[in-house]
Image: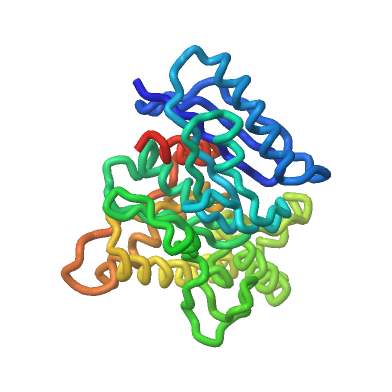
């Protein structure tokens, strides 16, 4: 049995665990990220913690995989920029290798998530996988012919920034009409809020009040289940936009499967079934092309750890 350490760097903590090639996982640990110290100090702390952790395992570790948010150059092993962590040109791989003496691999966290689902999750057994993350923004990751695709300097697979409507809504990236501006949970919540203002009779208002006034991605979906006309319109409009993005992905990559992750994926069949119907209606892009399965990602909070370990094990 081969083992690797999967390291998942988040906004407030760094989680890590031992992962076996059979998908077994054990002894999860974490350290807090102190934003008062430099990135170099944080990685030094992580390296020392990993040394202590590995010494306690009693098994041979093949290497350490790391998933990190931001602009990651997997060739140089550097976090070129991470806005949430305020890291710039941080040589993570060089630092961790010098401390632990083990092989180190790193990739962007969304890419790592896709690889984790391919290796151990909902996409296991498929060679061509697209992962779309529906959250504050729209992220993505690609596995093509069984290999993680990252693009030049690891800066590819920005699926949320394909243009689905020329001259459309302004996106956080500065462009207009991006998928993210229509299919993120942020965009859905905004559309929900606007619909509530126009239609004070909608049950979405009562639903939001029951949630302490919170309006999020669940508001329209949950209220639509009650037959509320306005909520159904918001949901269907959202699904139309998301389906447009997925059809583009079908045509560009012709994957075996598209996985959806992020908070909205908790809607499960309420999300995936209407998307499957929309994709099938247009023959997954054009006639006589193979079916593209649409499923929800399955690894949850462990996706980052599994995917990071897979960088070493697969």
Where 198 sits versus 314, above or below? below
Question: Taking 274 as reference, is 31 left or right?
Answer: right
- Residue at horizontal 39 percent and vertical 28 percent from the top: 23
Across and down, in percent, residue 198 comes to 70, 77
Quadrant for residue 35, please give it: top right
Toward the left, the furthest residue is 288
Which of 101 and 37 lies nearest the eye of the viewer? 101
Q: Is residue 177 above or below residue 236?
A: below
Q: Image quadrant for the N terminus? A: top left
Q: Is residue 81 above or below residue 104?
A: below
Q: Residue at x 52, y 15 (%)?
A: 57
Corner quadrant of residue 152: bottom left
Residue 109 visible somewhere in the drawing: no
Q: Position of residue 85 (x, y in %)?
A: 71, 51
Residue 6, horizontal then vertical, whole percent:
51, 34
Front residue (pair 227, 141): 141
- Please report the residue visible at 57 percent of the width from the left and 31 percent of the height from the top: 16
Q: Is residue 224 visible?
A: yes
Of the 4 image quadrants, the one containing the C terminus is top left
- The percent position of residue 274, horizontal first and vertical second, equals 40, 61
The residue lying at 71 percent from left, 43 percent from top is 40
Q: Quadrant of residue 177?
A: bottom right
């Amino acid at each position: 049995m081969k083992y690797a350490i999967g390291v998942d760097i988040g906004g407030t903590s760094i989680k890590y665990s031992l992962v076996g090639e059979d998908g077994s996982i054990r002894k999860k640990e974490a350290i807090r990220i102190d934003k008062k110290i430099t990135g170099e100090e944080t990685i030094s702390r992580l390296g020392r913690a990993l040394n202590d952790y590995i010494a306690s395992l009693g098994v041979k570790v093949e290497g350490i995989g790391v998933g990190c948010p931001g602009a990651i150059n997997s060739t140089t092993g550097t976090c070129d920029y991470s806005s949430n962590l305020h890291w710039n040109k941080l040589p993570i791989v060089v630092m961790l290798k010098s401390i632990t003496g083990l092989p180190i691999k790193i990739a962007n966290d969304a890419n790592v998530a896709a690889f984790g689902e391919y290796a151990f999750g909902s996409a296991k057994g498929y060679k061509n996988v697209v992962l779309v993350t529906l959250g504050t923004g729209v992220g993505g990751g690609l596995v093509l012919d069984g290999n993680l695709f990252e693009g030049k300097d690891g800066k590819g697979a920005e699926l949320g920034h394909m243009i689905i409507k020329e001259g459309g809504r302004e996106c956080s990236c500065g462009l207009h009409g991006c998928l993210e501006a229509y299919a993120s949970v942020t965009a859905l919540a905004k559309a929900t809020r606007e619909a509530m203002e126009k239609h004070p009779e909608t049950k979405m208002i009562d639903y939001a009040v029951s949630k302490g006034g919170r309006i999020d991605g669940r508001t329209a979906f949950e209220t639509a289940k009650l037959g509320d006309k306005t909520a159904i319109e918001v949901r269907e409009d959202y699904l139309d936009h998301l389906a447009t993005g997925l059809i583009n992905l079908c045509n560009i990559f012709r994957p075996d499967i598209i996985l959806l992750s992020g908070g909205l994926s908790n809607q499960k069949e309420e999300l995936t079934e209407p998307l499957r119907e929309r994709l099938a209606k247009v023959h997954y892009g054009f006639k006589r092309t193979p079916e593209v399965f649409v499923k929800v990602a399955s690894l949850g909070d462990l996706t980052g750890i599994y995917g990071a370990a897979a960088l070493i094990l697969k």
